[in-house]
Amino acid sequence: MYERILIPTDGSDTAAAAVDEALDVAEKFDAEVYTLYVVDVDAMDLSLGTEQVERVKAGRFGEMDELEAKARAATEYVAERGRERGVDVAEHFRAGRPHDVVADFAEDHDVDLLVMGSHGRSGVRRMLLGSVTERVLRSTHRSVLVVDERGTENREAE
Amino acid sequence: MTPLQLLPDALNASFKAVPAVMVSAMLLLFLGIGYVFRVADTEDLWVAGRSIGNVENGMAIGANWMSAASYLGMAALIALSGYYGLAYVVGWSTGYFILLIFLAAQMRRFGKYTAPDFVGDRFDSDAARAIAALTTILIGFVYSVGQARGMGLVGIYVFGGDYTTMVVLMMSITVGYLALSGMLGATKNMAVQYVILIVAFLAGLYAVGWTQGYSTILPHIEYGALLSELDSQFTEPFATDSFYLWVATAFSLIVGTCGLPHVLVRFYTVESERTARWSTVWGLFFICLLYWSAPAFAAFGTDLYANVVGPVYGANGMSGAEGDVIVVLASQLANLPEWFVGLVAAGGVAAAIATTAGLFISASSAAAHDIYTNIVNPDATQRQQLLIGRGTIVALGAVVTVTALDPPALVGELVALAFSLAGLVLFPMFFLGLWWENANRQGALAGMTTGLVIWTAAVLNELVLATDAGPVVPVYADVFPAVGAALAGTPIVFAVTIAVSLATEEPDERIKRIVRQCHSPEPMGQQESAEEVATDGGQVSAESQPSSDAESDGGPRRGE
């Protein structure tokens, strides 16, 4: 049923919460698994400066060691969990606005299931920090499985 | 203190349809271009895309650099203070030579992201990083107050209304522009901003010179003929201010230029050291186009004012507010058509917005990257950084707006305060940090603290706590004038940093190697920074090679 599964990650615990469920599904359907890290250019503009965005635009991400290490650590986590269960995970990196890029990637690779974590914030915290997952839901026509971070914690505690 | 009454009748401050449309259209153009050239999804982060050349980099340096202070303030200072104003032209141009010779290429080799990053990593200290970050924010604040005042005054000319409304309106536009250009995924379009501001300024100068019979093809030289007719207060050296103040101001501006975070940031990111040097040369050329013109514009403006309005100097002379819009005022007094005066005004707004955007982003990165991510929460996600960055911009915008409602000085002077701060606190750290490997953490902390204390005392003494009778401690103001505190102060900061560094332990070998690498005659690969070379002995790290799976992104797409 599912042939290609995408696990977007930003290296946060929230994103990690989705990994196990995604791999469960992948194992069951013997699906191809992609993981994608998106360099958020808006965040980079305000935290490192516009000049750094130009640098990424020019394809010089390789010079930006710390960022590259962070990105690789995020996807490597997913790949490692996959290896533990014998699932191959292809790691991908792109830059742009996270939800747009995730939705575009899903189209480009004809992904039929996206699995994403959700922090389950509400109220002011949700308004301020927003939710990439929520935006992806609105920008893609593909199926999305949302894994609530707190839900997994509870299950683990049981 | 400058009385902030409305602009003179001569300026005809009321709503003008054509200039208002022009200014609005210009802002929309910036957004539009930003949108068209926004960062589209990058398919492969490691494959070279379009890189920015020397000329375009130079234009970006010019636009980032030339603010309302250059566009409006410099001519104002020359018009109001005559010869003293030249200290600004001299100081601001010379600064780039020091940058070119001592810092640009070395900064590139060090290869970090922000100015506080450099200070924090070079001196291996989060305290030093924090002081540098706070100084960056403080520079952004003082500098932007000058921009807000300039935009407010031009706003009155274009839209009418009173000063308060205009400052609030123009600052809202600036913050909104930053937010919107972020939302559109647009990066600032510096080259366009530069072209608009330089065309507006030069067109204004040529038109005024031509119609009033002052000049023909080279107003920059022809205005010399006018000098004998102008008041002696305009032409006589040191008539209004002392020799010491002139030298102190020029010196402050020179070292300040080399310490400004929003100027230096470009050098970390250019493609190579060669690009760093040539971009500086082009930047200096583009800046000089305006700087050669400003004294001529000021002379024309002053003469027109004397002929049409009344005496420039003395009790009923030109006010600070009039001086700050002398460029627009001169075009108006020369009876140029309204749309043309609108163009000159739009150029002023372009200059102010480009620089304010650069300053605000420097401040937001100091807060989000240097303080929050590096010190407070190393696990910060991109979204948290975005939130902190946006919060900083909004907060800074609000504080700047409030302060600009009753600013303590002229546009040019306010900006000079930011320069003396940069020259006192950051320049010595960059200079010693790059050129003397034994400069250490204790030295840096002592030096930066000394610089901050000297600057704060000078500002409190002369501007904040001063009464009508003058500064609180006149002697201190003589030695450390707020706009020129760096002349006496920077050598003190150097001395303190060196003395403390000598008295304490030398920095470890790793740091010394990084410093040496910044000067190594061995050309460094484009993908390397000094730290990498120093740690892995010149091997290009395998990690920077594209990984095979990343490459697959560039491959043929699967069909839908």
Image: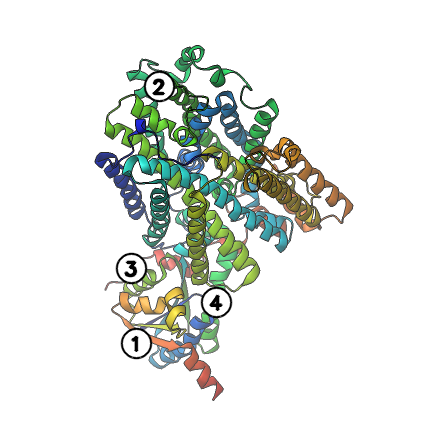
Q: Residue at the right extreme?
A: B503
- Nearest to the observer: residue B236 or residue A25: B236
**SS at circle 3:** loop
Task: Give the chain letter at badge 3.
Answer: B
Task: Give the chain letter at badge 1.
Answer: A
Q: Mark 4 highlights which residue?
A: A76
**SS at circle 4:** helix
Task: Name which residue type carries label 1.
Answer: Tyr
Q: Are marks 2 and 3 on the same chain?
A: yes
Structural distance between the alpha carbons of marks 2 and 1: 78 Å
- Nearest to the observer: residue B314 or residue A71: B314
Is B454 rendered above or below residue B319?
below
Residue B524 seen in render: no
Task: Name which residue type carries label 2.
Answer: Leu
Q: Quadrant of the N terminus of chain A?
A: bottom left
Task: Give the chain letter at badge 4.
Answer: A
Task: Name which residue type carries label 3.
Answer: Arg
- Nearest to the observer: residue B132 or residue A131: B132
Mark carried by residue B557 = 3
**SS at circle 1:** loop
Residue A101 seen in render: yes
Name the residue rendered at 65%, 35% in the picture. Answer: B476
Give percent across and percent down for residue A3.
30, 74
Give percent across and percent down for residue B478.
63, 31
Q: On the picture, is B387 further left or further right than B456?
A: left
